[in-house]
Amino acid sequence: QVQLVESGGGLVQAGGSLTLSCVTSVSTTFSFQDMGWYRQAPGEQREWVATITSGGRTDYADSVKGRFTISKDNAKNTVYLQMGSLKPDDTAVYFCHSSLLGWGQGTQVTVSS
């Protein structure tokens, strides 16, 4: 079964860093996929965080620009989200999205003040 599996979430103090990973079980098409990260805070709608296209172009929401970095490793079928200077407002469930495969199950990130 095709899957997107996120990992790397956890509890971190404000100002700290975390790196999220998302691995797909489908290796043959990974390099052709646009991959993204989204997040959903309690009581809020899911919002876009960052995208990396199949060609490697990246884009970020204004709220995370300069603090987060999206990258991918085609050989490992994995996309990453490096998060730095974390704020309590970054607390959310973070979801990986593939243009071909859909959504992962999410990983919780909690930033304490």
Image (cartoon, rainbow, N blue to C red):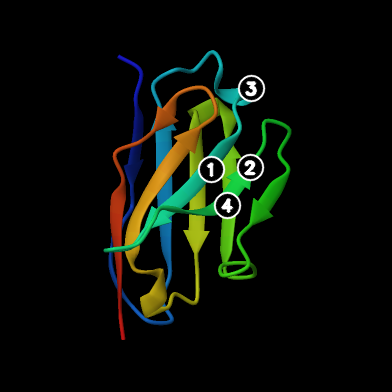
Task: Point out the tag, 3 or 4, that comes first from the N-terminus.
Answer: 3
The reply to whether discs 2 and 1 touch (Cβ–Cβ < 8 Å) is: yes
Task: Point out the tag, 3 or 2, that comes first from the N-terminus.
Answer: 3
What secondary structure is found at the residue carrying circle 3?
Answer: helix
What secondary structure is found at the residue carrying circle 2?
Answer: strand
Where is residue 14 shown, x and y percent of the image? Answer: 38, 82
Tell me which residue sits at (55%, 23%) in the image.
30
| Type of amino acid under label 3 | Phe
The reply to whether discs 4 and 2 touch (Cβ–Cβ < 8 Å) is: yes
Where is residue 32 shown, x and y percent of the image? Answer: 63, 22
Q: Is residue 22 left or right of residue 62?
A: left
Q: Nearer the viewer, mark 3 or mark 4?
A: 4
- Cα separation, mark 4 vs mark 2, equals 7 Å
- Cα separation, mark 3 vs mark 4, equals 17 Å
Residue 104 image-quadrant placement? top left
Residue 57 image-quadrant placement? top right
The reply to whether discs 1 and 3 touch (Cβ–Cβ < 8 Å) is: no
Task: Point out the tag, 1 or 4, that comes first from the N-terminus.
Answer: 1
| Type of amino acid under label 1 | Gly
Q: 10 Å neighbourhood of mark 3: few (<14), some, or many (≥20)?
A: some
| Type of amino acid under label 4 | Ala
| Along the viewing direction, whichever of 89 and 44 lies nearer the viewer | 44
Q: Look at mark 4 in the image and give the residue it sits on.
A: 50
Tell me which residue sits at (41%, 33%) in the image.
23
Marking on residue 36: 1
Tell me the quarter of the image containing the C terminus: bottom left
Q: Look at mark 2 in the image and give the residue it sits on.
A: 52
Where is residue 5 shown, x and y percent of the image? Answer: 33, 35
What secondary structure is found at the residue carrying circle 1?
Answer: strand
Q: Look at mark 3 in the image and give the residue it sits on.
A: 32
Examine the rendered structure and indicate whether residue 57 appears above or below residue 61: above
- Cα separation, mark 3 vs mark 2, equals 11 Å
